[in-house]
Image: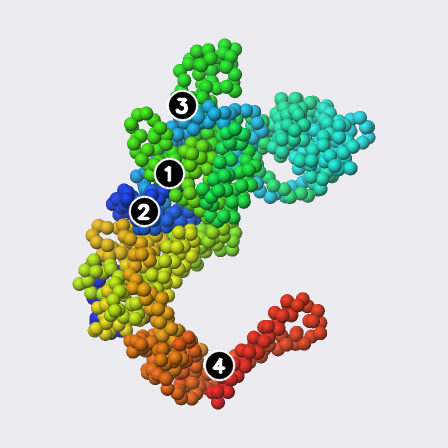
Amino acid sequence: MIASLTPQEMDDRNPLSQTEIPKVYDPKQIEEKWSDRWAKHGDSNTLANPSGASFSMVIPPPNVTGALHVGHALNNTLQDILARWRRMRGDDVLWIPGTDHAGIATQNVVERQLAQQGESRHDLTREAFIQRVWDWKAQSGGTIIGQLKRLGASCNWERERFTMDEGLSRAVREVFVRLHGEGLIYRADRLINWCTRCRTALSDIEVEHEETDGLLYHIAYPIADRPGESLIVATTRPETMLGDTAVAVHPEDPRFNGWIGHRMRLPLTERTIPVVGDAILVDREFGTGAVKITPGHDTNDEAAGQRHRLPTLSIFTPDGTLSAAGLSAAEVLPEQAANLSGQTVQNARARVVAALKEAGALVATVAHRHAVGKCYRCRTVVEPLCSLQWFVRVNDPANSLAAPAIEAVRNHRVRLIPESWETNYFGWMENIQDWCISRQIWWGHPIPAWYCRGRDVGQCGLACNEPMVTMTPPTRCSHCGSTDLEQDPDVLDTWFSSALWPFSTLGWPDALQPTPEGQADAQRMLARFYPTTVLVTSFDILFFWVARMMMMGLHFMKEPPFRTVYLHALVRDAEGQKMSKSKGNVVDPLSVMSQYGTDALRFTLAAMASPGRDIRLSEERIEGYRNFANKIWNAARFIQMNTPDTLEVGVRGALTLSDSLLPADRWIVARLRRVAGEVNGKLSDFRFDEAATAAYQFVWHEFCDWYLELVKVDLQDAERKAATRQTMSACFGEILKLLHPFMPFITEELGQTFGLYGEGRLMATMPYPTLEHLPNDGTDESADESFQAWVIEPVTAIRNLRGGMNIPPSEALPVFLTFRDPVGAAPNFALLQPYLMRLARLSSVTLNTAPPQPNMTAQTTRMDIFIPLSDVHRKAEMDRLEKEMAKLDREREPLEKKLADPNFAKAPPEVQEKQRLRAESLAEKRSRMAEDRARLG
């Protein structure tokens, strides 16, 4: 710790600058000040370095509906650390911010607002509703941007983008039209995931599966040509059995393969269906070994239906109720159809089960835990539904989107960090299905496809699945010339536009246009910053977003959208539980920032960001790093009070080495070089946790706890103080630079207060401490090793002896030192001895002389240390040793009894060995204590 100043030190102090650092560190005041200052004068334009190497990132665009949550805080803290670090390293940094229109989520927000007024979107025209969404977006849609600025995110805010701004909308239309022209976008009737609450299709990865306790129903399907015999089928969804078109068994299952080719009578209907053999669909160990095939309501069944050329029956409506028309097509018995028509899934299930019981077809129900798909937005159970939708063909043999994205990772054109995610990536991409991109909502990118209304009345022969797809609305039907056209009512999946984010935000496709408007800037930006350098994102959107950006970037730009993808883990509570409002364990970053300061939160997240490992966040950890900020603040006050204001700015910020440099100064410069090399290396490897920990250990323990105590010796010496003040302030300036990417607010405030950079300059314009930047005369290692051996180790050993004897720190002690190699003793030990005297609180130091008896002894790498014991200390040490030996005896006794027990010999050898080694260790420790006790008399 930084000890209190002595009276002499108080008299000698002189403020470093005319702005005296307040006694209390108030992060709120500092953060508000610098957030405003950076917004007005410190935007990224002023920090650009066109002569530097390009470094670019795109922010994972948060939903425009969003507020800052702890996942955003982690993600943007890590990005900001990289951006600030690379700016200070001299790179030309571009970090593009923006927000996502978040189709379903945003529409839900505005619909809830309408509901509070007793309205729904259907009470408005589509145009009026969309205008309401734009109005809401203008009023409160930028909330999260302000919160990101409060977090300290140093984005290029002047280049902020929105996924529905005009430039990005042009990119979306361009991509859609071109992919459609290449046959990679098509429209078809397919089984899709349908949210009955949002009333829209969802892609496969927008369905989140939850383990749920349910039932497995065993239902008897009578064999049509064998009266009295039946096949028992197991299903979790008896209500969809009405849409069955076959029953499947494993072709190698001797129990049932004899039935393949026979027909079953479907209970509650007038239909018969075939028994087919299917080794892909059927798991012989599941249920009864026989399963139903319902192609209209299960994706696996749809594939089985295609394999066996089965018809598809759809018995549900888009609102999730049973359809009268569907029941009729399925030939459900009239009395059953009347009972089921219009019923919800849950009601229908109960009524079907009751009807099966009444018919004697329900054989058994068995408890069964299984995964249920739910909408990722509203948590409604998703229904597979056959529907006419737009799809992206991702595995076209002649023009695959997926194959280049797989190869780019396989040949390391794109690195995934941690590399362990490559297996997941390959597994998913190699089995990727066509992507359903149409959504049945109003808010989003309209699909650029138009239809001739004449087709509805037979006036136009244009097939409904062959719309006119163009960049701009057509004026006439390309087939019949009619001007009565309508645009496709669907909008695009929000991930479609965000898949283009790395190049659409840089100006594409403006760079392709023949007009000069925006073309030059777009060409420059794309040439300079695409591919982007790194993407920092959460692993849970590797397939939602990262894989799709890979496919689109490679297809349209012929280069991957980024060189490196750093996938960080999730933030959980202190017990490792997922945060949720229902559990009451959510850590609100905005509240934490108000209570502990933004720098404390940022440093906590960085220090815990270990690749591949979830972060267990607690307020205690954040409070601990708030104490770190306090430590830095107090160090600054100490330096300010002990450094004269006559030091010029240019001199104050420079670290120098000379023959006259004092040992403590030379040691701290060596340690600074070491930590600078380590932090730069760890950030290069995306080891944010290790970089933060290295900086923390150096600043708290080496600079504050050791160096600032050591310099109190030199500051009292008239000949030493000038050089020490110079090194102390210059070293602290380098520390502020070192910490700036992690803790931008406190470092900017202290740097400006000290005047370390010159009037009007910002920390981000200063060079980051590196091995190349810091002075070096080749003596780093020897200076570090010498100071460690002759000061740090003996002081630590003497403090430990004090602690063991409970001798108060205020009591000065005599010490005798015997050098192991007197010839090789430190040549400047006379300079080092004052450090020992002060930090170890010694009354005298005697060298290479036999110490009086009794004494306490400690050994270091270079010397033996002896502290004579007074009668009081001797008696206290004897009592302590006797208590410790008694404690060891109590611990050893049961161990020795266990080892002597014949029954213990039957224990596993490794268990016996562990207990034996433990007993030996205790015996050895007691023996040493007994020797020490005997020596004391």
Relative to 828, say whether 878 is above or below.
below
Query: Measuring 34% from the left and 26% from the top, which residue is drawn there?
Result: 513
Q: Which residue is mark 1?
A: 530
Which of the marked residues, 2 or 3, is nearer the chain's N terminus? 2
Residue 455 % position (x, y):
50, 13
Measure how far apart labels 2 and 3 are at the Cα level: 38 Å
Q: Which residue is mark 2?
A: 91
Measure how far apart labels 1 and 3 are at the Cα level: 25 Å
| For the residues bearing labels 4 and 3, Cβ distance under 8 angstroms | no
Which of the marked residues, 1 or 3, is nearer the chain's N terminus? 3
At numbered mark 3, what does the secondary structure look like: helix, strand or loop? loop
Which of the marked residues, 4 or 1, is nearer the chain's N terminus? 1
Measure how far apart labels 4 and 3 are at the Cα level: 87 Å
Measure how far apart labels 1 and 2 are at the Cα level: 15 Å
Left or right: where does residue 274 sit relative to residue 213?
right
Q: Which quadrant of the structure image shows residue 178?
A: top left
Foreground tag (2 vs 3): 2
Residue type at numbered disc 4: Arg
